[in-house]
Image (cartoon, rainbow, N blue to C red):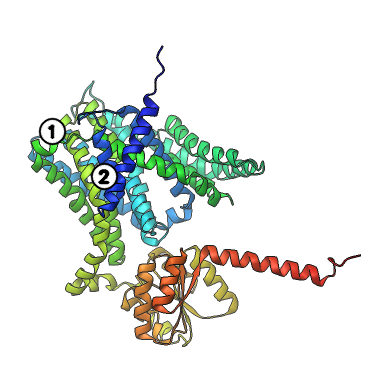
Amino acid sequence: MPHSVDLITTIATALGLALIFGFVAVRLKLPALVGYLLAGIVIGPFTPGFVADTSLAGQLAEIGVMLLMFGVGLHFSLDDLLSVKKIALPGAVVQIAVATAMGMGVAHWWGWSLMAGIVFGLSLSVASTVVLLKALESRGVLATPNGRIAVGWLVVEDLVMVLVLVLLPPLAEMLGGNGAPASTQSLLGTLVFTLGEVTLFIALMLVVGRRFFPWLLWQVARTGSRELFTLCVVAAALGIAYGSSALFGVSFALGAFFAGMVLRESALSYRAAEESLPLRDAFAVLFFVSVGMLFDPRVLMEQPLHVLAVVAIIVFGKSLAAFLLVLAFRYPLNTALTVSASLAQIGEFSFILAGLGVALGVLPVEGQSLILAGALISIALNPLAFQMAEPLQLWIRARSKRARQLEQRDDPLAELPADVASHILSGHVVLVGFGRVGQHIAEALDAQGLPYVVAEQHREAVEKLRGRGIHAVVGDAAEPAVLIQVHVARAQILVIATPDAFQARKMIEIARTLNPHIHVVVRSHSEDEAELLRREQAVDVLVGERELADSMVRHVSEHVDAHRGSGMDAQP
């Protein structure tokens, strides 16, 4: 029997061509993922030459999705998820409904059936988590309030799609798909059963998983074997993801996300994230290659107007809906633009839903081709959407007084109460950002009895701070109105605890305009970024790794000095 090397051939060819095309794309000032997509098209079944195993590539890509979602879970706590529920839950549901309605509208215009329109619209309504995470990570905004809202929004979308995939077969039977018609009672029973399964899975992960898996990780770490530790991390990610799908009907991606969330409870979560990073990056590349392999370029020539309509719904239609929804919840303009750019693409769930629709006989094969074309084009355009967010934000604010008013309109959290504002002493601290770093700083300021005011984009966080009697204002501190509200003109120190260096520069410029003598302390992730800020802005910049190293050296020195002072090192 000949030895099969299909798996090796697929991985070697996919990664090799992805490297070549990705390198060319970067040299042409294009995102690397455009090169990965082109590599997939080259080795796909719709172009001449070598054809890779599409089935194997899809499974490898699924592993990449699981590992990437696992990594996000390692940095995304349950508190982070719950903290954005007030905007992510209603926002995602309404946005899905709007995008689905738009898809149904064009499907009806093309003469498709009602069920085909529903499946088509739902496929266009859900964004790719992989694409979103790569975009947020590359810009260093994954841990920011905007990043948490975008991730929470997509987690809700994933949960909705889990329900849709389970409910679609009985719904298709009711509305004219393959098989015998199903009853409304059967549909309701399926819905209740699915909700019960998902609820049970989440409960088990949060109650049992949060205790067992961190304990397991610690036991493996005690062996001192790096190989076993890495194996434990990967096995936990893939094992929980597979088990959640096999036992509870939850998607691989969602299962892996919750696996990361429970392992985050371990003190070794940072090491777990670091150990799994190379695998996550490699398999994420395979995801983009597999997307390219599914694309048939002929659809661009045969149905260009249909493709244009699909891309318009994905990139503009549902993004505009999300943009207006975020503004309606009184979040800043930059939050609305970040979320809308995050949703301006579709991915893995869209492929699964389209494939199921074709298999059930409710979606024409033409619809699947259009969905794949829309996915490929929207993924390629997504980096451009993020790049356009900042200039678009400046353009809107400069030309629309209404847009400026919308951000601060009658929002009680957008300004300090009059009685508080009038009694704030000069010389207070302005703290921008109330994430994990900001919370530690606030605790230290409280311990020293120093007055401070918090500027935070996250409305729920500001509500909690106000409830605890802490002075806080909601808004983007890169806007003059927000820094005016926190009385930066009378402050002694401005502490920027958010990791976005670009926004930090704007905050510093505005603060120095209002208060030329204010002292500024900034957080940074890299030495190069820190040196640039020191040179351009003349501020104190603290780099996380450097401060940790300095603190450890200080503890070592103190211990050595105490040891010497006790005379324990004296020679007999």
Q: Secondary structure at mark 1?
A: loop
Q: Which residue appears farthest toward the top when viewing the image?
A: 1
Q: Is residue 514 visible?
A: yes
Vertical arrangement, residue 316 with respect to residue 291, above or below: below
Neighbour class for label 1 at 10 Å: few (<14), some, many (≥20)?
A: some
Check disc 1 and report the residue beneath it. Answer: 113
Quarter of the image for the C terminus: give it. bottom right
Which is more toward the observer, 277 or 345?
Answer: 277
Q: Secondary structure at mark 2?
A: loop
Distance (Cα) linking label 1 and label 2: 23 Å
Q: Which residue appears farthest toward the right when viewing the image?
A: 572
Vertical arrangement, residue 445 with respect to residue 61, above or below: below
Check disc 2 and report the residue beneath it. Answer: 346
Question: Which mark is in front, 1 or 2?
Answer: 2
Quarter of the image for the N terminus: give it. top left
Residue 49 position within the rendered picture, expressed as x and y whole percent measured from the top left: 23, 28
Question: Who's the residue at 41% across and 73% down the image?
Answer: 533
Q: For residue 462, which quarter of the picture?
A: bottom left
Residue 214 position within the rendered picture, expressed as x and y whole percent measured from the top left: 58, 45
- Give the mark count: 2
Q: For residue 353, which quarter of the picture?
A: top left
Residue 399 position within the rendered picture, expressed as x and y whole percent measured from the top left: 17, 73
Neighbour class for label 2 at 10 Å: few (<14), some, many (≥20)?
A: many
Question: Who's the residue at 58% across and 39% down the image?
Answer: 227
Mark 1 vs mark 2: which is more N-terminal? 1
In the visual, does 223 lie left or right of 278? Answer: right
Question: Who's the residue at 26% across and 52% down the image?
Answer: 382
| Mark 2 residue type | Ile
Vertical arrangement, residue 409 with respect to residue 115, above or below: below
| Mark 1 residue type | Ser
